[in-house]
Structures are given as structure tokens and as C-alpha cells.
Image (cartoon, rainbow, N blue to C red):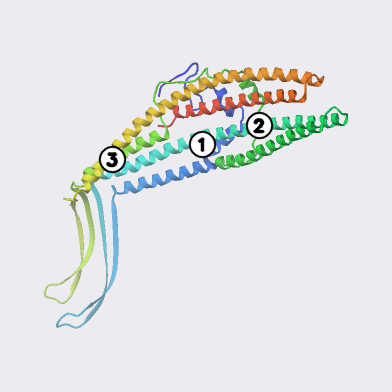
Amino acid sequence: MLISYSSTVLGDRNKIFHSNEDIETYFPVLKVIFQDLDDNAPLIIESKQQGRVATSNKMVADSAKGLSVNLNVSGYSIHENRPGQNYDQSYRTVGSIYVKKPIYHWGGLEAKSRIAELSAEYSVKQTIAIKSKLILQVKSEFMKLVLLNFQLRLAKDALSISEQNEEDLIKRKELGFATELMVSQATIEKLEQSIKIAEYNRLLITQKAYFKHDTGYYNEIVIDIPEKFESFYNKHEFGKRIPQLVGSISSENLEELKSQISVEKENVKIADSNLKPKVNLVGGFYQDQIDLPNKADSVRRNNLLIGIEANWALWDSSYTKGTKSLALAKKRQFEIQLESNTKKLRLEMNSLHAQMINLAKQIDIARQLVSTANNRFEKSQLEFDINQITYKSYFSSKLDLSKARLSLIQTVFTYFQVKEKYEFHLQYPK
């Protein structure tokens, strides 16, 4: 797979983009979670078990090409009433063993084994892909938690201002400088902020529970934004090191279709072998009992059999023709789907690339908005302290600053999510 990019050489799966654009760089707990996903995440545990099933199916399919041995031991009580002789009863045990080994089946057995092998190979790839997708999902869920926590903090700051304003208006009302209506309005704003905080807390509890279930990590996680991350998203040049797509890409859907096409090719071979003679090597040892010539007695005889067996199904109506036609039709269907989905994925990748460039521009604009809103808030704070503006104007400037900061972080996280998805398809295991 060929990928062009500005300044780094493609190395491991996490170094296509600059390492500064990895969310786990700023939240180390994610690295700990990722290390334990294989053992803790239910989705990966289930996928690994599916892999064991596929490996077992491969073993079953391979056994059809191997040696089979059957042993039979029997015990009998024989009652004979021969004409002109006395009634006789005897006891006898006999044994037999048969061995069979396929020699030539026109590739049919090999095709069945290859189908099972393809399933096992795809299962391994799928487990790797599921882990990669889960890491992407975990990062996305973690960023939602961080964002929710940040919104909660902003709401608490707004609540603190609302409480201060309510207290101030109550004092001013007692001095005759405010009305009951103004106090009631301040109380309503305080209660609205309290409702928002309660809702954010509810969402945090719910999403943390899902996060713990998906990752299997039940320790407490720190979701406060560190200063290092704030410094990063305020200064980093986003969109400068986006790899250009010049080679192959893939996805879970495309790899599944490729596997299905290979399976149908093998099904064609199986259908072709149905009406052809099958040759097996056979051998056996068995015992029987025969009468002695001119005597009433019998003797037990040991027999050894070694030879070649040929089985030829001459006619099966339209079964073989139908199975081959079905395999060819399904193969062509999967090929058409593969071609169509490959084009769609390439369009999606181009769209993701364009989104990252656009989001980088949005981040620059959001930074300017934060800077402007911060300057306004600082001036409003000074003017509010000397009673040159009303609380409503001061609170409005604080709210605008909070919205601007929230918008910036949301845009940065959206960039991360788009970047992770883009990177995932570039590095999908083939």
C-alpha cells in the first residue's frame, strides 16, 4: 500500500499521522485500556472464540483427506439346529478393522479444506479489525465523556455566576435598587443551570457505564482536560500532515466480499468433482466362520483385504449443474458488490480527507472566536466590577466565552474522530 505524506515515514499502525494527533498522548489511561482489550473487551473475546470455531472447522474439513480407521468387535451366542444332527449351542467373538484413505477426488476434498482455511484466515483478520474498530470506538466514546465533563464544568461555572447574581439582586432589592421580578428572573436562570447540571451528570453516569462495558475496564478514569492538551489544541497546526490516498484501501465489508469470492471459486471445484470417479485406498482385516467340507463342524477364518476402491456417481439429475451455476452466480454477485463498494469507500475516503482539511480551517476560526470572546469577557468583568454594565451583559459575555471554548473542543474532537476513521481504512489488515 502506497501512501504519500509530508514529513514522516510510514512505520507502525499508529504513526501515519503525527503522534501529537493521537488522543492517547494526552490521556494516558487510554493506553492502559488498549493494552488490556484482548483480555477484557467482550467483543474481542467473542471474536477470538469465533476464531477457535473456524480453526476447528478447518480441522474437520482436513480430516476428510486423511486416513480413517474403523474397528468392530462382536460377541455372539450361536444356536444351531441342523437337520439330522443334535441341537448345538456355542459362543463366538469376531473382530474386524477397516482402513480407508482418499487417493484422488478431483480437487473436491482440497476445495472443502480450502473453504475452511479461508474462513479461519478471515476470522484472524476480523479479530484484528474488530480490535482496531473497537479502539476507534473507545477513543470516540472517551472524547464524548471528556466533552460532557467539560460541559458540566462550564455549567457549574455558569451556576456559580447565577447564584452570585441572585444573592446580589436580593441585597439590591432590600436596598430598593432591584425589583421582585428581577430576583425571580435570576432564580429561574439559576434553576435552569441546575437542571442542565443534573442532565449532564445523568448522561455521564450512563455513558461511563457503557464505556466500562465495552472496554472491560472498571477502574476510575480521569476525564478532566489536562493543560498539555489545552496547549496542544490552541497551538497545533491541524491538517498539515494528512496522508494522501494513492494506493489500495480496504474495509471489513471489502475483505468479507473477497473471502466470499474465494469461497465460491472453491465451490465451483467441488461441483466439478461431483460426477467424476473418486478413488480410495482401502484395507481391512475381518473374521468369519465357514463349515468344513464333509463335516458338521465349522472353522473360524481370518481374512486380510487390501485394494483400490472407485466410486463413480453417474447421474444426479441437475444437482451438480445447479450447484456449479449457483456458485458462479454468487461469485459474480460478490464481484459486482466488491467493485461497487470499493468505489464507495474511495469516495468516502476522499470525503474524509476533505473533511479534515475543512475541520482544520474551522479550528483556526474557532480559536479566533475564543480569543475574541475571551477579550470581551475580560472587559465585561472589569466593567461589571465597577457597575458600568448589568449582570445580564456580564453573564452573556461569560456564556459566549463558554460556547466558544466548547465549540473549539468539539471541532478538535470531530477532527480526531474523522482522522481516526480515515487512518483505520488506510491500515485495514489485508
Identify the residue position indicated by label 3 in the image: 266
- Mark 3 residue type: Glu
Specify which label sits upstream in the sequence, 3 or 1: 1
Q: Quadrant of the N terminus?
A: top left
Identify the residue position indicated by label 1 in the image: 134
Residue 229 in the image, given as x and y percentages of width and height: 63, 25
Identify the residue position indicated by label 2 in the image: 151
Residue 165 in the image, given as x and y percentages of width and height: 79, 29
Task: Answer with left or right where residue 355 lies relative to residue 370.
Answer: left
Looking at the image, is mark 2 or mark 1 nearer the viewer? 2
Contact between labelled residues 1 and 3, with CB atoms less than 8 Å apart:
no
Which residue is located at x 55 percent, y 20 percent? 360
Task: Answer with left or right where residue 27 lies relative to residue 117.
Answer: right
- Mark 2 residue type: Gln
Which residue is located at x 53 percent, y 19 percent? 239
Looking at the image, is mark 3 or mark 1 nearer the viewer? 1
- Mark 1 residue type: Leu
Residue at mark 2 to residue at mark 1: CA–CA distance: 25 Å
Q: Secondary structure at mark 2?
A: helix
Q: Residues within 10 Å of mark 3 (few under 14, many from 20)?
A: many
Task: Answer with left or right where residue 257 lies relative to residue 311.
Answer: right
Q: Quadrant of the C terminus?
A: top left
